[in-house]
Amino acid sequence: MQHYSFSLDYLPDAHRHYANGIFCVFEDNNLVECGAEPTFLSDFDQLSDFEAAHIQAPIYIGGFEGKLYFAQEVESGTSERRGLANKTLRDLGHEDEILFALLSRGLQLVNWRRNHKYCGGCASEMVESSTEYAMRCPSCSLSFYPKIMPCIMALVTKGDQCLLAKHSRRGATVYTALAGFIEAGESVEHAIQREVFEEVGVKTGEISYFSSQAWPFPGQLMLGFYAEYLEGEIVPEEGEIEDAQWFDGTDLPEIPAPFTLSGKLVRAFFDKKS
């Protein structure tokens, strides 16, 4: 697993640092090609090419290896009008896991700011804080912070085998660990037991923490665990799971990419067994 550390402290007067910043451009949650080295990052001068299509000011993402990163959102259709390429962050993850993690934060901050233009309490227009990542209501004083949705991901294990499932989504071919949102008032442990039983009909016992990953589609924090099989026969949830089976290291189906938490869970399990 790659280890890295970002500086995520709020940056006051961020505009004073634009000249020395590195920028990414988002359009409809996709990255827009705006620079040459690397393709989807640019400096402040290159950002001026998109000025007519800017949505609000650039937002500070964080610092990494002495460089400051910013995200700029532009209007729908900008890349098509300019003949530029775009790609999803999922595609970027295959190429550069660290950049994926950094720009994942950028996408979540862009969506947070866009989705909180108006107060959920009184419908007044919100104002962006100058001291922290918060959208504040000048009328009723409510504050809205970037939303994070905690999810569990559990790889159920039984001896040298693990349970993988293929979802019923159209065109799905990948077998993955089981996952789901943690419900209000629910513990991580209960969420694992509930999700696994709901999706494949088996009960789990002891769990052990593996790792986590920010997943910006739209704003999950994935918490990865191994969960030991306890009892029960596999019964895929109708309409949700197309197929679920036990696999060992010699007969693995198509599994998620190495940069994903699910891909790491599966690979680490069989690496340890070998």
Image (tube, helix red, strand yellow):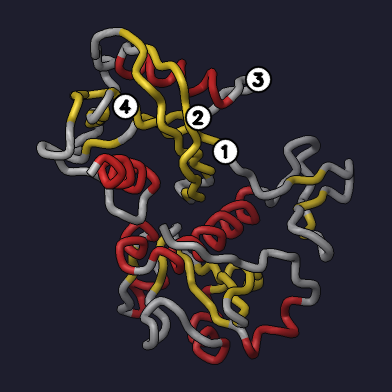
Question: Secondary structure under badge 3?
Answer: loop
Question: Which residue is found at the position 33% from the left and 13% from the top?
Answer: 202
Question: Secondary structure under badge 1?
Answer: strand
Q: Nearer the viewer, residue 227 or 85?
A: 227
Label 1 and label 4: CA atoms lie apart by 26 Å
Question: Secondary structure under badge 2?
Answer: strand
The reply to whether residue 59 is in sight is: no
Residue bearing the label numbered 4: 157
Label 1 and label 3: CA atoms lie apart by 13 Å
Question: Secondary structure under badge 4?
Answer: strand
Q: Earlier in the sequence, mark 3 or mark 4?
A: 4
Q: Earlier in the sequence, mark 2 or mark 4?
A: 4
In the rendering, which numbered label is found on residue 149?
1
Q: Quadrant of residue 249?
A: top left
The three-letter code of the residue at mark 3 reads: Gly
Callouts 2 and 1 close, C-beta under 8 Å: yes
Residue bearing the label numbered 2: 181
Q: Earlier in the sequence, mark 2 or mark 1?
A: 1
